[in-house]
Amino acid sequence: MASEFIYGLIQHHPIYSLLGSYFLFSNLVGAMEPPGEKSGPLYRYIYRFGHGLAGNLKYALKAKFPQYVETTPEVK
């Protein structure tokens, strides 16, 4: 029953589902600890790939939905 409700929400509101997925992914990537000296190569790769993907998604969504994507103010 709950899965049908969630599927219906995603089907009827794809933009909000996309933005919610981006928000979740961005927070998961942001919560990752930076790789240390003892971090393995797989974690370093996942860390860099995740942050690179999150940054590219941010710019792509900012171009389409500027009101929904938070930007960091430029420091002069």
Image: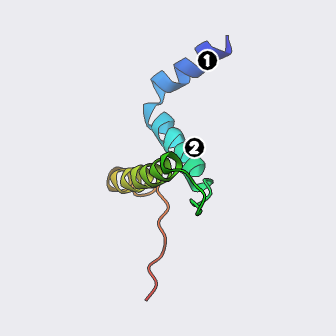
What residue is at 46 percent from the left and 56 percent from the top? 69
Give the CA distance from mark 1 to mark 2. 19 Å
| Residue with the mark numbered 1 | 5
Tag 1–tag 2 contact (CB < 8 Å) = no
In the displayed orientation, state which residue is furthest to the bottom. 76
* 1 or 2: tag closer to the N-terminus: 1
Question: How many other residues sit within 10 Å of disc 2, few (<14), some (14-19) or many (≥20)?
Answer: few
Q: Amino acid at mark 1?
A: Phe
Secondary-structure class at tag 1 = helix
Nearer mark to the viewer, of 1 and 2: 2
| Residue with the mark numbered 2 | 24
What residue is at 54 percent from the left and 47 percent from the top? 23
Position of residue 7 measured from the top left corner of the image (x, y, whole percent): 54, 19
Position of residue 15 measured from the top left corner of the image (x, y, whole percent): 44, 37
Position of residue 12 measured from the top left corner of the image (x, y, whole percent): 47, 24
On screen, residue 76 above or below 3: below
What residue is at 40 percent from the left and 54 percent from the top? 52
Relative depth, front residue between 5 and 74: 74
Q: Which mark is residue 23?
A: none
In the displayed orientation, state which residue is furthest to the top. 1
Relative depth, front residue between 2 and 32: 32
Position of residue 68 measured from the top left corner of the image (x, y, whole percent): 47, 53
Relative depth, front residue between 45 and 11: 45
Counting labels gives 2
Question: How many other residues sit within 10 Å of disc 1, few (<14), some (14-19) or many (≥20)?
Answer: few
Q: Quadrant of the N terminus?
A: top right
Q: Amino acid at mark 2?
A: Leu
On screen, residue 75 above or below 5: below
Q: Quadrant of the C terminus?
A: bottom left
Secondary-structure class at tag 2 = helix
On screen, residue 35 above or below 57: below
